[in-house]
Image (cartoon, grey):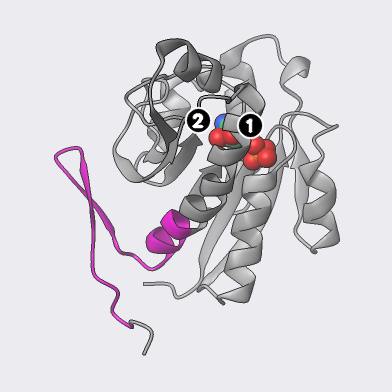
Amino acid sequence: MRAMKNIVILISGRGSNMQSIVRAARSEQWPCRIAAVISNRADAQGLEFAAEHGIPTAVVASKAYPSREAFDAALQAEIDKFAPDLVVLAGFMRILTPPFVEHYAGRMLNIHPSLLPSFPGLATHRQALAAGVKVHGATVHFVTAELDHGPIVEQAVVPVLPDDDEHTLADRVLAQEHIIYPKAVRWFVEGRLRIDNGIVRVAADANPPV
Ligand code: GRF
C-alpha cells in the first residue's frame, strides 16, 4: 500500500469544509497530500485559501460545457491528473452523472447538511424547519448515483431551537460539519472504512492516542 494518499477536494463556493479538512490534515499530520482543490466556478472563494496554502487549484467551469456529460468528462480528466485515492465533495453544487460516480465508486465522499435519509436536495434547513423536527444535523456519506444517498460514514445531531431561522440553524449545523468531515476523511486516509452491504464499518484506531 502506498503510504501517502492523494486527496482531491471539489468546491463551488466558500469552501469552509475544505478549509477544515486542510487544517486538520496538516495539524494532525495525516498520511495524505491535498493534491488539488478544483472548483466549477472561477469565483469560488475557497480557491484563494487553497492557493494561499500552496495547494494546486483548477477551475472546470460548468457553464462552459454544453451538457452534464461533457462537463463531467472534463472534470474527471482534470481530477485524474492528480491520481486521487479519494475525491472529497465539499459544498460542490452539481448533480453528477452515473458514469462519473461509478468511476469514483468507493473513493468519493460528500457532506450533506441534514440527517439523511431525511431532507435530501436543496434548502435542507428550510425543509427541517417546515417539518418541525426537533433535531437536525449533517451526514458524511459515500457518493452513489442516487442524489444524497449512499453509505453513511458519520453523522452529527444538533437541536432545533424554538427561535431558529434558516441561518441560525445552518450555522449550528455547519459547526458540526467542520468536525465530522475531517474525522471521516481521516478515517478513509487511515484505511479504516469498509462498506459491508451498504453499511459503513469503521475499524478501531490502530494507534490510539495515549
Ligand atoms: C455546507 O453546508 C455543505 O454541507 C453544503 O453546502 C455548504 C457548503 O459550505 N452542501 P462550504 O462551501 O463548505 O463552506
Residue 103: image x %, image y %? Answer: 42, 36
- Left or right: residue 193 versus residue 133 is left
Left or right of 153: which side holds 72?
A: right
Look at the numbered disc 1 and give the secondary structure of its residue: helix
Q: Which residue is mark 1?
A: 168
| Residue ID at (63%, 56%) | 20
Direction bottom: furthest residue: 210
- Indicate yes or no whether the magenta region holds residue 201: yes
Range shown magenta:
183-207
Q: Are marks 1 and 2 in contact (CB under 8 Å)?
A: yes
Question: Callout 2: few (<14), some (14-19), or many (20+) C-alpha neighbours within 10 Å?
Answer: few
Residue under the image location 38 percent in, 84 percent down: 209
Q: For numbered disc 2, what is the local secondary structure?
A: loop
The answer to whether residue 136 is magenta is no
**In the rendered view, would you say 138 is above or below 57?**
above
Q: Residue at point 66% right, 27% down?
A: 167
The three-letter code of the residue at mark 2 reads Leu
**Circle on res. 161:** 2
